[in-house]
Amino acid sequence: MKTSCELCSAALEPDGAAWICSYECTYCEDCAQRVGTCPNCAGELVPRPRRTTGAAAIATRLPARAARSITRRLSR
């Protein structure tokens, strides 16, 4: 996830509000409202999804087989 707005360089928190286009150009809320569409590709801007957990937390919700596979990869 990008950590700053592509127009004004404002810092974007990982769990904070931000807007993205389908190419993942990322903008702060103020810039997104000002421009309306992505100035790079003219694509629609939508709220950026938020990550709620890390990989270890996700692994605990997966079936045992998938969890073992992820755990092996992380321990390398």
Image (cartoon, helix red, strand yellow):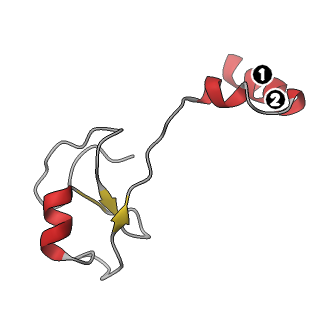
Q: Residue at x 27, y 75 (%)?
A: 38
Q: In the rendered image, is residue 38 in sight?
A: yes
Q: Residue at x 75, y 29 (%)?
A: 70
Location of mark 2 (residue):
69
Q: In the rendered image, is residue 76 in sight?
A: no
Q: Residues within 10 Å of mark 2 (few under 14, many from 20)?
A: few
Q: Is residue 45 above or below residue 1?
A: below
> Residue 13's x, y, as percent?
27, 38
In the picture, which quadrant includes the C terminus? top right
Marker disc for residue 45: none
Front in this rendered view, residue 24 or 47: 47
Q: Residues within 10 Å of mark 1 (few under 14, many from 20)?
A: few
Answer yes or no: do the residues labelled 1 and 2 have beta carbons within 8 Å?
A: yes
Q: Is residue 13 left or right of residue 60?
A: left
Q: Is residue 7 above or below residue 42?
A: above
> Residue 61's x, y, as percent?
74, 30
**Amino acid at circle 1:** Arg
Kind of element beneath mark 2: helix
Q: Is residue 44 above or below residue 17?
A: below
Front in this rendered view, residue 39 or 61: 61
Q: Residue at x 79, y 27 (%)?
A: 67
> Residue 30's x, y, as percent?
13, 60
Location of mark 1 (residue):
72
Image quadrant where residue 42 sits = bottom left
